[in-house]
Amino acid sequence: MKSYIDSLLELIYPEKNTCFICEDYDEKISDKYICQDCERNLKKIQPPVCRKCSKPIDYNSSIDLCPECCDTKRYFIMSRSPYSYEGLIKKAIYSYKYYNKTYFYKLFGSLLIDYMKDINYTSFDCIVSVPLHSSKLRERGYNQSELIAKYLASRLSIPYVDAIKRTKKTLRQSGQSKEQRRKNLRGAFEIKHPAEKVINSSVLLVDDIYTTGSTADECSRALVNYGAAGVYVITIAR
């Protein structure tokens, strides 16, 4: 039987059957947190895509790699993203990060679970998240990637490991070139000790957006150097 507190919370923070994006109420929504109309308007990434980073490619390539992944060493095995970073999903991610809509992790987590199961991208030993610098965490109050990672861990019954720390306060990545991003992030991440579950493990690294891959690469570098058997990346959009 539902407790009084649970019932009260549902009245104050209605979530079930409510679309987080347009805020419409519809019993068909259930606990997906998005209505059919809004979900149809999310732009999915369509194949063909780079087998390494999921960037859409519009040419026939014998190795199925985009130019960036041909020219750049990647420390992760592959990265997957269901959506293109534009339109509704871009607005939703912005609201999640900068307008204190912490509950959006349920929407993004639910969308990612459906996508990951659809592409059979669920066989991992542990799940980690891209960290925020301590000053940014104090300012925002939460790590948006960590909330999603813990949701995925719970739904997939895979251990979440608080494995990575950000030791360098970097400049904001948006607006920087690919090379500037790489220089900005070089040496910015370290593994927290102890993190034995990472060693010899298949690790899923969770972030909100994949842009140039610099953040994913630097986190993956730290994990691989620590002893991870392989790092896979999942983001909401790219």
Image (tube, rainbow, N blue to C red):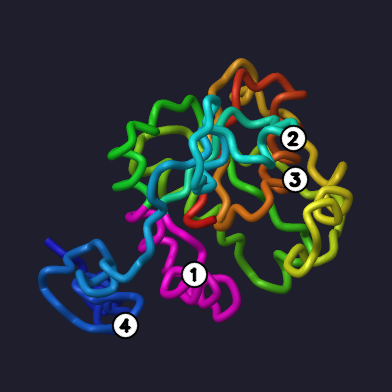
Which label sits on residue 86?
Answer: 1
Q: Which label lies toward us, 3 or 1?
A: 1
C-alpha gap between disc 3 and disc 4: 35 Å
Residue under the image location 33 percent in, 46 percent down = 115
Mark in front: 2 vs 4 = 2
Label 2 – label 1 distance at C-alpha? 26 Å
Rendered residue at 18%/68% (across/down): 29
Give the amino acid at mark 2.
Asp
Few, some or many C-alpha atoms within 10 Å of disc 1 (few <14, some 14-19, many ≥20)?
A: some
Q: What x and y, as percent, mark residue 77? A: 59, 28
Give, as a three-letter code, the residue at label 4. Cys
- Let me know if residue 89 is in the magenta part: yes
* Disc 2/disc 3 C-alpha distance (Å): 28 Å
Instruction: Compare residues 150 and 82 and report the one nearer the observer.
Output: 82
Q: Which quadrant of the view contains residue 226?
A: top right
Label 3 secondary element? strand
Q: Which residue is mark 2?
A: 71
- The span picked out in magenta is 83-111
Q: Quick one: label 3 or label 4, which is nearer the N terminus?
A: 4
Q: Earlier in the sequence, mark 2 or mark 1?
A: 2
Tell which circle, 3 or 1, labels the residue nearer the N-terminal end: 1
Residue 123 % position (x, y): 40, 26
Task: Find the distance from the CA under tag 3 to the CA under tag 1.
Answer: 29 Å
Disc 3 + disc 4, Cβ < 8 Å: no
Q: Secondary structure at mark 4?
A: loop
Q: Quadrant of the C terminus?
A: bottom right
Three-letter code for the amino acid on which mark 3 is drawn = Lys
Mark whose residue sits in front, 1 or 4: 1
Residue 111, placed above or below residue 121: below
> Which amino acid type is marked by label 1?
Glu
Say if the magenta span includes residue 141.
Answer: no
Q: Which mark is residue 165?
A: 3
